[in-house]
Amino acid sequence: MNVLHNRLCKSGKWFETVERRLLPWALQDVPLGARLLEIGPGFGATTRVLARSTDAMTVVEVNPKLAERLRRDGPGNVTVVEGDGAAMPLPDAAFDSVVCFTMLHHVPSASQQDRLLAEARRVLAPGGVFAGSDSLPTPRFRLLHVGDIMVPVDPATLPERLERAGFTDVRVSTLDNRLRFRAVAA
């Protein structure tokens, strides 16, 4: 992440936005269950909120420095796994729900995003829910990503991509500059 993006993602304002606006909207009517996995928690704004509603959760973070930071400063009921969301070192059908928030656009290609979607399906128990959100491109979004990886997810093609990954009951919607999705493991 560039300096501006890095500063925003670890700011108190972002943590407040996550808690008050992003997660309530993205997870509206989404049953998380007891075994929760978050892919790509970054600085942990979403992790801190989600950890309050479960006894234990697991997160997979590709950035070694952020993974270490989460181990050191994150909630005590969170297990941090350093790894790639497109090739997770986790067992099949181990989770009731998998979530990811504002991170898919950081995955370097659409094909790698598709591998991440397939991995989310692999680690979900049948009937489990995969849910999350991402940002849609705006001038401000593009500015925050100057020099960063930015592969926006098209809300028009996401349902088909989720179905190819093995999901059913796919729902994708947008509001302002965000998309949210929900899908069930077939």
Image (cartoon, rainbow, N blue to C red):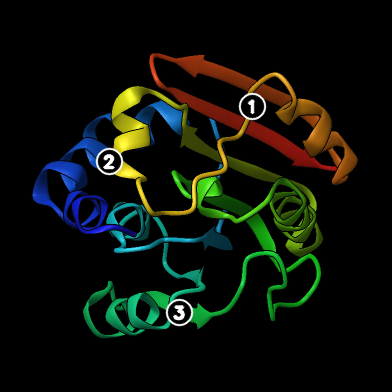
Q: Which residue is depicted at the point 63% across and 65% down?
A: 85
Between residues 140 and 15, which one lies in front from this camera angle? 140
Q: Residues within 10 Å of mark 3 (few under 14, many from 20)?
A: some
Q: From the top left corner, tell me how far across and down residue 144 is, in percent.
A: 29, 42
Q: Secondary structure at mark 3?
A: strand
Asked whether, in this view, residue 90 is left or right of residue 11, the answer is: right
Mark 3 vs mark 2, CA separation in Å:
21 Å
Q: Answer with mark 3 or mark 2, whichever residue precedes in sequence.
A: 2
Which circle marks residue 18 in the picture?
2
The quadrant of the image that shows the C terminus is top right
The first of marks 2 and 1 along the sequence is 2
Q: Who's the residue at 76% across and 39% down the image?
A: 184
| In the depicted structure, whether residue 25 falls above or below residue 128 | above
> In the rendered view, does 80 fall on the left or right side of 180?
left
Please identify the quadrant where the N terminus is shown: bottom left
Is 1 situated above or below 176? below
Q: Which residue is denoted by mark 1 in the rendering?
A: 154
Q: Pointer 1: residues within 10 angstroms few (<14), some, or many (20+)?
A: few
Residue 15's spot in the image, x, y percent?
A: 19, 47
Task: Answer left or right for 3 relative to 184.
Answer: left
Q: Residue 74 appears in which quarter of the rendering? A: bottom left
| Residue bearing the label numbered 3 | 79
Residue 125, picture quadrant: bottom right
Percent across and percent down for residue 46 are 34, 52
Q: CA distance from mark 2 to mark 1?
A: 22 Å
Given this view, does label 3 or label 2 mark the residue nearer the observer?
Answer: 2
Q: Indicate the amino acid at tag 2.
A: Val
Closer to viewer: mark 2 or mark 1: 1
Q: Which quadrant holds residue 169?
A: top right
Which of 43 and 34 lies nearest the eye of the viewer? Answer: 43
Which is in the foreground here, disc 1 or disc 3?
Answer: 1
